[in-house]
Amino acid sequence: MVLDFKCPQCGGGMEYDSELGKLQCRSCGFEQAVEDAPEIEEDDSVSVEPFDGGSIPDEAEFSNETEEKETSLYGEEQEFFCNSCGAAIVTEPEVSATHCPYCGSAVAFGERLQGKLAPDKVIPFTVSKEEAKAGFRKWAKNGLLTPKDFMTEKRLGEITGIYVPFWLYDMHVNAEADCSCTKKRSFRRGDYIIHETKHYHVYRRANLNYKKVPADASVKLDDTMMDLLEPYDYRRLRKFEPGYLAGFQAEKYGVDADGLLMRIKNRVSEYAQSYIKSTIKGYSTTTYNSQNIMEEKQQEYYTLLPVWLLKYEYKGESKIYAMNGQTGKVVGKPPISGARVAKWISILYGGSFAVLTLLSYFMV
Amino acid sequence: MKKMRLYRWMSWVLAFGALMTWIIPAENAMAETEWDEVVVESAPVILTPGDAYEEPEVSGEETEDVFATEHTQVEQILEDNLISTGITLNGEQRLYDFFGKFNEEEQEEISSWIIDREEEGGISIRVFVAGMAVEDEKYFLEECADALCDNGYAKEDLAIMLLNLDEDNRGVCIQGYGICETKLNDDRIEYILDDIIAWFLEDDYVYGVKLFAEEAAYYVTAEEEKESVGSVGIVIPADRSPQVPYYKDNSFKGKLNRMPWPFLVIAPMAVAGLGIFLMIQSNGSKKTTNNKTYMENETSGLTAQRDDYIRTSISRTYSPRSSGTSGGSRSGGRSSGGGGRSGGGRSHSGGSRRF
């Protein structure tokens, strides 16, 4: 089922406006609350238990030497039909919202947003496309070694707003550490230096709760890059409504909640270790005799988080830059300009040479 | 990517250069530190009434006895030398050759040389040539200094040298009084000894003695503009380059040259390398979350903790305090001698060496 966002007044396409926090018609400017946008209808198809293949015997036999069908990188592409113009929209299987390539209408695919794939929560875009472009430009400009022609207006046109699927986990951690610590001091007594070492047996037990620790569930996007986009401000977390997707791309999760749990457990385990360490203060040395950390998942939320993505070709190299669609934080490594490196080397060299020469002059 | 790798390599190389640059001056700085110590320690000591220096309390009898034992012998040596050679201490003579080492011509050459150097340095320079036991040298010179200064034969700013030519105790002893105590401190006396000993070993005693006078005057005037010394074949050895921190060259060029030029060239390179290295490292994005970002403070915290004291272990290492100095001179650190105080109460620097 294809959802589209039609203006109830003129029938034109509507898109989510990050400044208004509402849907707005591109033609007549009519504004509509996100909650009033079309909702996904319940799937009325018959629900069946899958066959147990092992219990059904083969009724025919075929050769294995069949031609392999060409598939896309992430699975088979699927075809939908645009409600506005009737054109066929071919999408990759993880895409849950996009634009019709023919009429430009915002569309969402109901099958990929319902049942197990229905997001619990969403953080709407607060950084508009123009603000995102300005943000990328400012970021490139602030880079001391970034080339001048990097992030030109023309290339910034290819910026895409995308709702990236994340799992947010509430985790409970019980951490326990048993350590041997020492306090050392030295002082002089006559002709001797006395080294005093006080030995302590130290124990810490902590009960820690971590709320909504995110892990990106997209198979396409780089995990490290997505981690660097954090943190998101959860005060803007909303109940999911399809209307938030109007005008943006969206993906459904490629890895389920259990598939990412180990990653989150490792992350909170590191957090807990560092918390315990921060409570052992005032000692010269600390040796851990034992340390037990038990992580337990309390709850998970399937959430869509806003990201501005920019695929950028610079001197033959293709790179992806991302911006947190809520805070504006930019992630990615900008290219380095040889001319700017040379400029900075001469400035630093010349400057420090002048300072040292002056110091030399005034040296006592 | 290749470019990035190249830049990273460049920055590593420059950073290595930086490290080396800081290590090399750090080694040189050790010599400077020693010099600083010398300057501080040889500076006049200001005493407040509360911590006034107290002479050790000893009975009058004992003092007399000790003084008598130590100094009468030395006085005797001086007296014996004066009597046996018929030489008298006076305001004219610069070289007192009790050993008969130098002929008249040589004596004249040395004396006139010393007189010129005295004028240059504004100090008195005296050289004694005699033979005696090593342990008597220091006291002998102190006795000579007292005798010369008490009678007005020499200025209180006195650089004095003993050339001991006793067959079994050949050596040189130098002392500095008055302004020479700081200008010609123990370190500088060591430098002078380094230079002159070589000439005595070559049996060129005239040159050795003249070099002593030359270098004594040189160090005393070291703060004045002076780039090289020696006019009649006596030169300060080549390693006395301007960066060695025991004298200052106050000319414009000299001021600029106070830092060694390799340092001036390499250090900025290192700064530039470090700067670029840091810029490349910080190029890109940083993590802005930590272990507290997602922690719910109200429901998180320690539920139990113990810090039980077990025991104390103590070890000690022997490290004797450096002995205090008296008379404002540095003592210790030299096997060859050091400063002290003469019987007449004159504080001095000093150093000696055998050859």
Image (tube, rainbow, N blue to C red):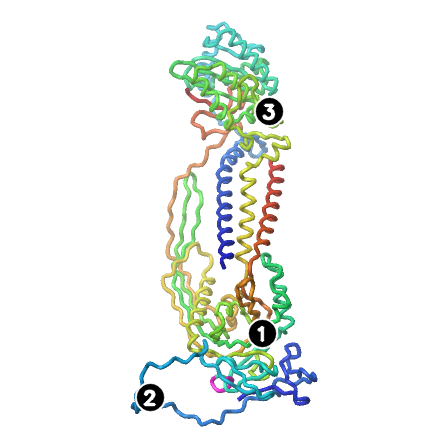
Q: Quadrant of residue A5?
A: bottom right
Give residue A278's position: percent from left, percent from top: 47, 62
Choose the circle earlier in sequence order: 2 or 1: 2
Q: Is residue A276 visible?
A: yes
Which chain hosts label 2?
Answer: A
Q: Does dot 3 land on a helix, a strand or a loop?
A: loop
Quadrant (top left, top right, bottom left, bottom right) of the C terminus of chain B: top left
Tell which of A316 and B338 is nearer to you: A316
Residue beneath disc 1: A160
Residue beneath disc 2: A53
**Stretch of the chain drawn in magenta:** A112-116
Q: Amino acid at mark 3?
A: Thr
Q: Does dot 1 land on a helix, a strand or a loop?
A: strand
Mark 3 and mark 1: Cα distance apart in space? 78 Å
Q: Amino acid at mark 2?
A: Gly
Give residue B204's position: percent from left, percent from top: 46, 15
Tell which of B54 and B200 is nearer to you: B200
Respond whether the residues carrying marks 3 and 1 are from the same subunit: no
> Contact, CB < 8 Å: mark 2 with mark 1?
no
Respond whether the residues carrying marks 2 and 1 are from the same subunit: yes
Crowding near pointer 1: few (<14 within 10 Å), some, many (20+)?
A: some
Q: Is residue A266 above or below residue B8?
A: below
Respond whether the residues carrying marks 2 and 3 are from the same subunit: no
Residue beneath disc 3: B221
Q: Is residue B339 visible?
A: no
Asked if the magenta segment contains residue B167, the reply would be no
Marks 2, 3: nearer the viewer: 2
Give residue A331's position: percent from left, percent from top: 55, 66
**Residue at 47% across / 59% down in the picture?**
A281
**Residue at 39% across / 42% down in the picture?**
B317
Q: Does dot 2 land on a helix, a strand or a loop?
A: helix
Give residue A325's position: percent from left, percent from top: 59, 73
